Amino acid sequence: MRDILVYVTDKEQRAVVENRFMEGEFHAAVFDDPELALEACSLELFDLAVIWAAVPKETEAFIEALREQQLDYIPVVAVFDSPGVDAALNELALVDLFPVPMDNQTLFHLLTTVIRDVDPHG
């Protein structure tokens, strides 16, 4: 089972995100506080970080904080639900970005593919 960190930028979506990942093939640590998410990254080894409900400013700040703490080896994927943010997110140091809504089977397949692409032993 793969370990992923999910940082939910919209606190109202946290419960929905936790429920989505309960049925999947991942062990997901879900946070809605960026400081707690970063602390978890420094304490645990994650295969992937997912920024859920990604918006450019918060996504960029999270990626920069990972870099400053020398945790930028963790690949980051953005999941966005706001129209028009994909162009700005595409400019950031992300491995990939995915629009939602998306069914769990497709989402989990895409996340697994990303992990395999960045990990030759995946």
Image (spheres, rainbow, N blue to C red):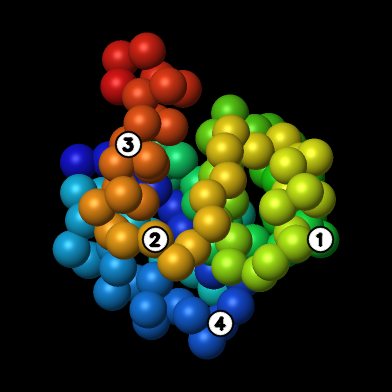
* N-term-proximal mark, 2 vs 3: 2
Q: Which one is in front, 58 or 86? A: 86
Q: Quadrant of residue 1?
A: top left
* N-term-proximal mark, 1 vs 3: 1
From this view, report whether residue 85 is shown above or below residue 2: below
Q: Which residue is identified by label 1?
A: 57
Q: Amino acid at mark 3?
A: Thr
Q: Residue at x 56, y 82 (%)?
A: 11
Across and down, in percent, residue 41 comes to 52, 48
Secondary structure at badge 2 equals loop
Residue 28 is tagged as none
Q: Residues within 10 Å of mark 2 (few under 14, many from 20)?
A: few
From this view, report whether residue 37 is shown above or below residue 119: below
**Labels 1, 2: front one:** 2
**Labels 3, 4: front one:** 3
Q: CA distance from mark 2 to mark 4?
A: 19 Å
Across and down, in percent, residue 64 comes to 78, 45
Q: Which residue is identified by label 3?
A: 112
**Labels 2, 4: front one:** 2
Q: CA distance from mark 1 to mark 2?
A: 23 Å
* N-term-proximal mark, 2 vs 4: 4
Q: Amino acid at mark 1?
A: Lys
Q: Residues within 10 Å of mark 1 (few under 14, many from 20)?
A: few
